[in-house]
Image (cartoon, rainbow, N blue to C red):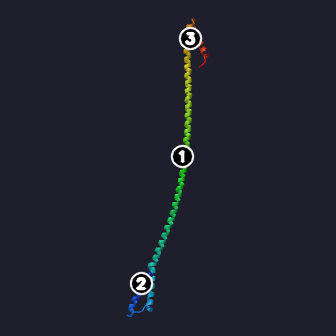
Amino acid sequence: MGYYLTLLFNNMLIFLQQDVGHEKPSLLSVNPGLIIWTIIIFVLLLFLLRKIAWTPLLKALNSREESIKNSLDNADRLNKEALELIEQNKRNLAEANAKSMELINQAKDVASKLGDELKAKANEDAKKIIEQAKAEIEQQKNSAMDDLKDKISDIAIEAAEKIISETLDKDKQKKLVDEFLSKVPNN
């Protein structure tokens, strides 16, 4: 900017000197009219530059500075929010892992208890089946023994009839055989 001002000043000096006279002034000569007009033009130029260029430039620079500052503040705020979100995600992940481990442990416990209950029920059912089978076997054994006793008593009566020529009536014979069989052991 200073370059343009000095260029303007030099051109004005040359222009003013050409109108004054035809003789060539020296560079070191002092012309008071030229100095006054130069100062007036310089002050007017400064005033115009202040109104036209400096104020808008300063406003533009200030607004640019403010927008950069706001951008930096927003970037810092967003960075803090991102860090908070990362920490929150880490906490949520840790909670989810803990809950999943808890659920897995609970499922294992439930499965273990259910397995134990099923084994106990199976053992109980097996005992009931064995007891029922034993009872059925005992009942069939008793039934078979009763049938065997009846057959033995019938065979004994027939044999006794053949051996004894004196015939007894059938009821007395049956009574005698039953008494005899009751003395015989169950095995």
Which residue corresponds to mark 3?
157
Question: Counting residues from the N terminus, which is met first, the one under dot 3 or under dot 2?
Answer: 2
Measure the alpha-carbon separation of dots 3 and 2: 163 Å
Quadrant containing the C terminus in the rendered view: top right
Residue located at (56% from left, 30% from top)? 128
Q: Mark 3, residues whose alpha carbon is within 10 Å: few (<14), some, or many (≥20)? A: some
Residue 81 position, x and y percent, is: 52, 61
Gap between marks 3 and 1 measured at Cα: 77 Å
What kind of element bears circle 2? helix
**For marks 3 and 1 on the same chain, the one whose residue lies earlier in the sequence:** 1
| Above-or-below relation of 46 to 91 | below
Along the polypeptide, which appears first: circle 2 or circle 1?
A: 2
Please say if the residues under marks 3 and 2 sit with CB atoms less than 8 Å apart: no
Figure check: 83 above or below 132: below
Is disc 2 surrounded by few (<14), some (14 to 19) or many (20+) residues within 10 Å? few
Horizontal side of 91 relative to 29 (left or right) equals right
Query: Where residue 95 sits: x, y (%)?
Result: 54, 52
Comparing 176 with 55, the one in front is: 176
Q: In terms of secondary structure, where does tag 3 sit?
A: helix
Tell which of 44 and 9 is nearer to you: 9
Circle 1 sits on which residue? 104
Instruction: Tell me which residue sits at (46%, 78%) in the image.
Output: 54
The residue under label 1 is which amino acid type? Ile
Q: Residue at x 56, y 21 (%)?
A: 141
Can you give x and y, in whole percent of width and height, for residue 45 in the image? 44, 83
Q: Quadrant of the N terminus?
A: bottom left
Badge 2 is on which residue? 7
Query: Disc 2 marks which amino acid?
Result: Leu
Label 1 sits on a secondary structure element that is helix
Residue with the most extreme right position: 183
Q: What percent of the width, then of the height, locates residue 161? A: 56, 8
